[in-house]
Image: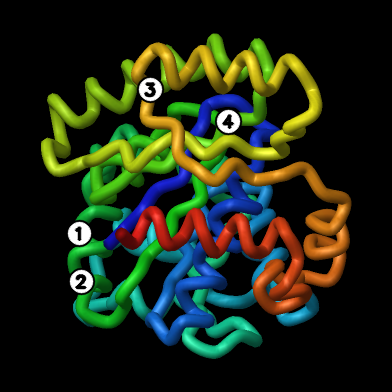
């Protein structure tokens, strides 16, 4: 299963959700890969911490390789690095992604990631793809190649307006390029159950028939500590309420 975490709005928790779900998969013994397509590299930093290096293999190298011809077959696995956590690997991001985008688009390389995912499927039980906050070449590549799409939502009116456009974009890519793409659901992030606005907004999304997943991920300062320590919640505090919410959400996605 290759699952892309996507929202065109920034700051909704894509990297946090990607890495914590991936870490839970790995903690359950599943061979797990995170592909970080966001040039900011938040998922890469979250999973690698001090082990992250500028000269390590990365996703930019993978895409650069698709632009050149080589007598030697270069496999996608050559751009993957191990994390400090058992069963968990990452294809790190790179700031060079921004410079590569126009070259990749002009050479029509949007299906290269799908080819790589097909090759990687035999070596990994779960693949999670973090994406930039834009419908650009890299996001489209992920949606074309993935089997499922997960949409973070942070109970904000701007995020709600963007949600409808996002759903239309996903439907268009499914119709044109990837009929197997399934919207796995909307993940409510930073939910505050005692506040009226989040409760009302989520209730309205459910009433509209949108695929809102439960449980909702509660707001917690603990996630900032998790980022600072480069430790997904399942490794830092397995019994925390946010960790348990991630575990329950992971179970829903696996079910």
User: Mark 3–mark 2 contact, CB under 8 Å?
Assistant: no
Judging from the image, what secondary structure is the residue with disc 3 in? loop
Earlier-in-chain disc, 4 versus 3: 4
Q: How many marks?
A: 4
Q: Position of residue 58 (x, y in %)?
A: 52, 67
Q: Which residue is mark 3?
A: 210
The crowding category of the residue bearing disc 4, from other C-alpha atoms within 10 Å (few below 14, some 14 to 19, many at least 20), is many
**Residue placed most toward the observer, 113 or 178:** 178
Disc 3 from disc 2: Cα separation: 33 Å
Secondary structure at numbered mark 1? helix
Foreground mark, 4 or 2?
4
| SS at badge 2 | helix
Is 22 located above or below residue 130 in the figure? below
| Inter-mark Cα distance, 4 to 3 | 12 Å
Q: Residue at x 51, y 59 (%)?
A: 248
Find numbered disc 4 in the image and state the secondary structure of the residue it sits on: strand
Q: Residue furthest front?
A: 194
Comes first in the chain, label 4 or label 2:
2
- Residue at 61% x, 16% y is 201
- Foreground: 26 or 102? 26
- Residue to which mark 1 is pinned: 115
Q: Please state, as top left, top right, bottom left or bottom right, where the N terminus lies in the image.
A: bottom left
Quarter holding the C terminus is bottom left
Q: Earlier in the sequence, mark 1 or mark 4?
A: 1
Q: Which mark is residue 119?
A: 2
Q: Is residue 160 left or right of residue 173?
A: right
Mark 3 neighbour class, 10 Å CA radius: few under 14, some 14 to 19, many 20 or more: some
Mark 1 and mark 4: Cα distance apart in space: 29 Å
**Contact, CB < 8 Å: mark 1 with mark 2?**
yes
Q: Which residue is found at the position 42% from the left and 14% from the top?
A: 207
Q: Nearer the viewer, mark 3 or mark 1?
A: 3
- Along the polypeptide, which appears first: circle 3 or circle 1? 1
């Amino acid at each position: 299963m290759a699952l892309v975490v996507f929202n065109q709005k920034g700051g909704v928790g894509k990297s946090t959700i990607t890495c914590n779900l991936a870490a839970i998969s790995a903690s359950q013994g599943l061979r797990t890969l995170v592909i970080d397509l966001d040039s900011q590299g938040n998922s890469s930093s979250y999973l690698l911490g001090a082990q992250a290096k500028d000269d390590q293999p990365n996703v930019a190298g993978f895409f650069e390789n698709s632009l050149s011809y080589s007598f030697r077959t270069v496999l996608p696995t050559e751009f993957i690095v191990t994390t400090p956590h058992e069963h968990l690997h990452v294809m790190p991001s790179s700031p060079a992604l921004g410079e590569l985008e126009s070259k990749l688009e002009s050479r029509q390389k949007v299906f290269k990631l799908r080819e790589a995912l097909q090759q990687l499927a035999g070596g990994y039980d779960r693949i999670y793809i973090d994406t930039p906050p834009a419908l650009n070449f890299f996001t489209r590549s992920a949606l074309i190649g993935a089997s499922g799409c997960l949409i973070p939502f942070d109970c904000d009116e701007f995020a709600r307006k963007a949600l409808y456009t996002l759903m239309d974009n996903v439907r268009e890519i499914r119709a044109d390029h990837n009929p197997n793409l399934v919207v796995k659901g909307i993940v409510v992030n930073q939910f505050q159950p005692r506040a009226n606005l989040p409760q009302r907004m989520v209730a309205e999304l459910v009433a509209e028939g949108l695929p809102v997943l439960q449980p909702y991920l509660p707001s917690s300062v603990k996630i900032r500590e998790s980022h600072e320590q480069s430790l997904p919640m399942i490794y830092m505090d397995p019994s925390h309420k946010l960790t348990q919410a991630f575990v329950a959400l992971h179970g829903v996605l696996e079910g």
